[in-house]
Image (cartoon, rainbow, N blue to C red):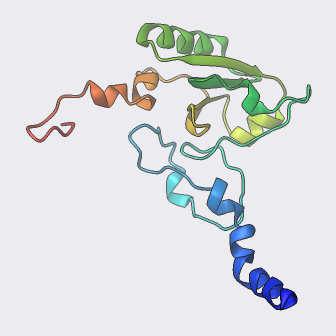
Amino acid sequence: MRREVGELIRQVKTNEFYGLGVVLGYRYTGSPVIVDDGTAAGWRRSRDYVPNAAPGCLAPHHWMDDGRSLYDLFGSGFTLLAFDGADPADVATAHEEARRTGVPLEIVAVPGTELRRRYGAALALVRPDQHVAWRGDGWPAANLLLTVSGRAMADAPRDAAGRAA
Protein backbone atom coordinates (compact mmCIF):
# COMPACT_ATOMS: atom_id res chain seq x y z
CA MET A 1 0.00 0.00 0.00
CA ARG A 2 2.84 2.39 0.89
CA ARG A 3 4.53 1.69 -2.40
CA GLU A 4 1.29 2.34 -4.30
CA VAL A 5 0.65 5.61 -2.47
CA GLY A 6 4.26 6.70 -2.97
CA GLU A 7 4.00 6.05 -6.70
CA LEU A 8 0.69 7.91 -6.87
CA ILE A 9 2.23 10.92 -5.08
CA ARG A 10 5.17 10.89 -7.51
CA GLN A 11 2.84 10.82 -10.51
CA VAL A 12 0.46 13.51 -9.29
CA LYS A 13 2.74 15.88 -7.38
CA THR A 14 5.93 15.93 -9.49
CA ASN A 15 4.82 19.01 -11.45
CA GLU A 16 4.06 20.83 -8.21
CA PHE A 17 7.30 19.84 -6.48
CA TYR A 18 9.48 20.68 -9.47
CA GLY A 19 7.64 23.80 -10.64
CA LEU A 20 10.06 26.42 -9.31
CA GLY A 21 9.19 28.68 -12.25
CA VAL A 22 5.65 28.94 -10.89
CA VAL A 23 6.95 30.05 -7.50
CA LEU A 24 9.89 32.28 -8.46
CA GLY A 25 9.45 32.94 -12.16
CA TYR A 26 6.41 35.20 -12.24
CA ARG A 27 6.63 38.75 -13.54
CA TYR A 28 4.57 41.85 -12.96
CA THR A 29 3.65 43.18 -16.39
CA GLY A 30 1.56 46.24 -17.05
CA SER A 31 1.99 47.46 -13.48
CA PRO A 32 1.97 51.23 -12.89
CA VAL A 33 4.79 50.79 -10.34
CA ILE A 34 7.11 48.90 -12.70
CA VAL A 35 8.95 50.75 -15.47
CA ASP A 36 8.89 48.43 -18.48
CA ASP A 37 12.03 48.32 -20.59
CA GLY A 38 10.35 46.80 -23.62
CA THR A 39 11.06 43.17 -22.72
CA ALA A 40 7.63 42.29 -21.28
CA ALA A 41 6.18 41.29 -24.65
CA GLY A 42 8.68 38.45 -25.06
CA TRP A 43 8.29 37.04 -21.55
CA ARG A 44 6.46 33.74 -21.02
CA ARG A 45 5.57 31.82 -17.88
CA SER A 46 7.40 28.57 -17.42
CA ARG A 47 7.42 25.66 -15.03
CA ASP A 48 11.21 25.88 -15.02
CA TYR A 49 12.79 28.85 -13.27
CA VAL A 50 15.19 30.93 -15.33
CA PRO A 51 16.49 33.98 -13.42
CA ASN A 52 15.63 37.20 -15.22
CA ALA A 53 16.41 40.79 -14.19
CA ALA A 54 13.79 42.43 -16.39
CA PRO A 55 11.52 44.92 -14.63
CA GLY A 56 8.75 43.06 -12.82
CA CYS A 57 10.81 39.90 -12.25
CA LEU A 58 12.26 38.67 -8.99
CA ALA A 59 15.80 40.04 -8.72
CA PRO A 60 18.22 37.23 -9.59
CA HIS A 61 20.04 35.87 -6.58
CA HIS A 62 23.82 35.74 -6.32
CA TRP A 63 26.30 34.64 -3.66
CA MET A 64 28.83 37.43 -3.09
CA ASP A 65 32.55 36.71 -2.76
CA ASP A 66 32.37 37.32 1.00
CA GLY A 67 29.71 34.59 1.39
CA ARG A 68 26.74 36.90 1.82
CA SER A 69 23.67 36.68 -0.34
CA LEU A 70 23.03 39.61 -2.68
CA TYR A 71 19.64 39.82 -0.95
CA ASP A 72 21.44 40.52 2.35
CA LEU A 73 22.60 43.80 0.83
CA PHE A 74 19.08 44.98 0.05
CA GLY A 75 17.66 47.67 2.31
CA SER A 76 14.19 47.68 3.84
CA GLY A 77 13.01 50.17 1.20
CA PHE A 78 14.19 50.37 -2.39
CA THR A 79 17.72 49.29 -3.31
CA LEU A 80 19.71 50.68 -6.21
CA LEU A 81 22.30 48.18 -7.41
CA ALA A 82 25.14 50.14 -9.01
CA PHE A 83 27.28 47.72 -10.99
CA ASP A 84 30.85 48.29 -12.16
CA GLY A 85 30.85 51.02 -14.77
CA ALA A 86 27.79 52.83 -13.42
CA ASP A 87 28.19 56.60 -13.74
CA PRO A 88 28.78 58.12 -10.27
CA ALA A 89 26.73 61.15 -11.38
CA ASP A 90 23.72 58.87 -11.95
CA VAL A 91 24.15 57.35 -8.50
CA ALA A 92 24.36 60.85 -6.99
CA THR A 93 21.20 61.88 -8.86
CA ALA A 94 19.36 58.83 -7.51
CA HIS A 95 20.53 59.66 -3.99
CA GLU A 96 19.35 63.26 -4.38
CA GLU A 97 15.97 62.15 -5.75
CA ALA A 98 15.51 59.83 -2.75
CA ARG A 99 16.36 62.68 -0.37
CA ARG A 100 14.03 65.10 -2.15
CA THR A 101 11.08 62.70 -2.40
CA GLY A 102 11.50 60.92 0.93
CA VAL A 103 11.47 57.51 -0.76
CA PRO A 104 13.78 55.17 1.21
CA LEU A 105 16.71 54.11 -0.95
CA GLU A 106 19.76 52.01 -0.17
CA ILE A 107 22.54 52.30 -2.74
CA VAL A 108 24.75 49.24 -3.11
CA ALA A 109 27.93 49.26 -5.21
CA VAL A 110 28.28 45.79 -6.72
CA PRO A 111 31.81 44.90 -7.86
CA GLY A 112 32.65 42.71 -10.83
CA THR A 113 31.05 42.23 -14.21
CA GLU A 114 29.16 38.95 -13.72
CA LEU A 115 26.12 40.56 -12.08
CA ARG A 116 26.11 43.49 -14.48
CA ARG A 117 25.82 40.99 -17.34
CA ARG A 118 23.09 39.07 -15.52
CA TYR A 119 21.11 42.24 -14.79
CA GLY A 120 21.70 43.64 -18.28
CA ALA A 121 22.31 47.23 -17.17
CA ALA A 122 24.63 49.45 -15.13
CA LEU A 123 21.87 50.20 -12.62
CA ALA A 124 18.96 48.15 -11.29
CA LEU A 125 16.33 49.42 -8.87
CA VAL A 126 14.90 46.69 -6.65
CA ARG A 127 11.64 47.03 -4.71
CA PRO A 128 11.24 46.02 -1.05
CA ASP A 129 9.66 42.74 -2.25
CA GLN A 130 12.88 41.93 -4.17
CA HIS A 131 11.37 42.51 -7.61
CA VAL A 132 13.16 44.67 -10.15
CA ALA A 133 11.26 47.94 -10.57
CA TRP A 134 13.53 49.46 -13.22
CA ARG A 135 16.90 48.91 -14.86
CA GLY A 136 18.99 51.04 -17.17
CA ASP A 137 22.40 52.41 -17.98
CA GLY A 138 21.62 55.95 -16.76
CA TRP A 139 19.27 57.34 -14.11
CA PRO A 140 16.21 58.76 -15.90
CA ALA A 141 15.33 62.44 -15.71
CA ALA A 142 11.74 61.71 -14.59
CA ASN A 143 10.80 61.12 -10.96
CA LEU A 144 11.51 57.40 -11.07
CA LEU A 145 11.21 56.89 -7.31
CA LEU A 146 7.77 58.54 -7.21
CA THR A 147 6.62 56.22 -10.00
CA VAL A 148 7.89 52.93 -8.55
CA SER A 149 6.72 53.79 -5.03
CA GLY A 150 3.21 54.55 -6.28
CA ARG A 151 3.38 58.12 -5.07
CA ALA A 152 3.13 59.51 -8.62
CA MET A 153 -0.27 57.83 -8.90
CA ALA A 154 -1.35 59.11 -5.51
CA ASP A 155 -0.57 62.67 -6.61
CA ALA A 156 -2.25 62.31 -10.03
CA PRO A 157 -5.49 64.21 -10.71
CA ARG A 158 -8.62 62.05 -10.19
CA ASP A 159 -11.87 61.86 -12.08
CA ALA A 160 -15.31 61.82 -10.43
CA ALA A 161 -15.02 58.04 -9.82
CA GLY A 162 -11.66 58.46 -8.08
CA ARG A 163 -9.61 56.99 -10.94
CA ALA A 164 -6.33 58.58 -11.95
CA ALA A 165 -7.05 60.83 -14.91
Looking at the image, which residue is at 43% across and 28% down?
149
Residue 34 in the image: state x and y as whole percent: 47, 39
Q: Nearer the viewer, residue 134 or 89?
A: 134
Image quarter for residue 65?
top right
Q: Residue furthest left?
A: 160
Q: Is residue 41 left or right of residue 83?
A: left
Q: Is residue 5 left or right of residue 37?
A: right
Q: Is residue 76 left or right of residue 64?
A: left
Image quarter for residue 111?
top right
Residue 28 in the image: state x and y as whole percent: 50, 49
Quadrant location, the N terminus:
bottom right
Q: From the viewer's perspective, is residue 150 above or below residue 30?
A: above
Looking at the image, which residue is at 18% across and 37% down?
165
Looking at the image, which residue is at 57% across and 37% down?
129
Residue 120 in the image: state x and y as whole percent: 68, 39
Residue 146 in the image: state x and y as whole percent: 40, 23
